Amino acid sequence: MEALVSEGAPDALFAALVCHPHPLAGGTMHSKVVYQAMKVLNDPAWGFGWPVLRFNFRGAGLSQGVHDGEAEIGDVEAALDWLVNEYRRPLVAVGYSFGAAMTLGACCGNPQLGSTVLANIHALAALGLPTHINDRDCKYPFLSDCTIPKLFLSGDHDEFAPAAQLEQVAASAAEPKRLLLLAGADHFFTGHLAPMQRSLAGWLKEQLP
């Protein structure tokens, strides 16, 4: 897989992963929301300064393979494995849109995820988690058993996640969890990237030491 690492402070307490939106809609690790989320985690100005890994899902950019739609969960698993082996510190995983669905699937609904990796995941943030695409509802039944702290952060005008549906998804998830809806924001957080960043940073500071 093609990947980029933004190195963090030598004494960083955590390492992080950020996963990109749907590759068939042009999503890559350089997508704007992915980049701005990475800046929150990596830039010391936000108070974290963590090393952050971004990668292109199979078939995107220079990553080998072909888009599948579900097998990308394995791509997330591989990225988490790499982070654990490279940094040997607790992890935070963030996904945007399709990347959010794959991140949650890997960390909460994947029995193949190694116990060492799973034990290292301390927080999950799902940005713009899709709940309705192409006349099809997206289901996340595994969230009911996922006790990793979870943030569901979306706009209240997200065209792929009607607020009422996202509220139902969040309600079905095990504690601890939080749902934050940014007023006026769409799926791409157009004009609302700074509030997205502030919301993500604020939640992380509440969750982590």
Image: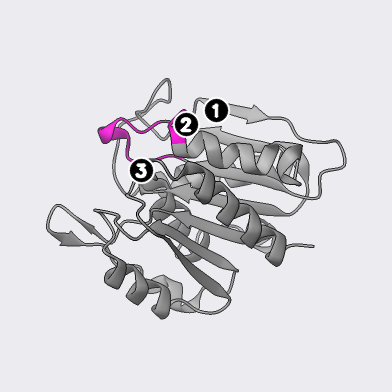
Tag 2 secondary structure: loop
Farthest residue in the right direction?
A: 11
Q: Which residue is mark 2?
A: 29
**Whether residue 96 is situated above or below residue 121 in the rendered picture:** above
**Do labels 1 and 2 touch, CB within 8 Å?**
yes
**Whether residue 206 is situated above or below residue 114 in the rendered picture:** below
Q: Nearer the viewer, mark 3 or mark 2?
A: 3
The disc placed on residue 188 is: 3
Which SS type dominates the magenta stretch?
A: loop
Q: What are the residue bounds of the magenta stretch?
A: 20-32
Q: Which residue is mark 1?
A: 3
**Whether residue 105 is situated above or below residue 28 in the rendered picture:** below
Q: Quadrant of residue 67?
A: top left
Q: What is the spatial separation of the Cα atoms under label 1 and label 3, in whole angstroms?
A: 22 Å
Whether residue 185 sits left or right of residue 36 in the image: it is: left
Q: Quadrant of residue 132?
A: bottom left
Please rate how many residues cluster around mark 1, counting C-alpha atoms within 10 Å: few if below 14, some from 14 to 19, many from 20. some
Q: Nearer the viewer, mark 1 or mark 3?
A: 3
Residue at 60 percent across and 58 percent down: it is: 114
Tell me where residue 121 appears, x and y as whole percent.
Answer: 65, 59
Quarter containing the C terminus:
bottom right
Tell me where residue 14 appears, x and y as whole percent.
Answer: 75, 49
| Mark closer to the chain start, 1 or 2 | 1
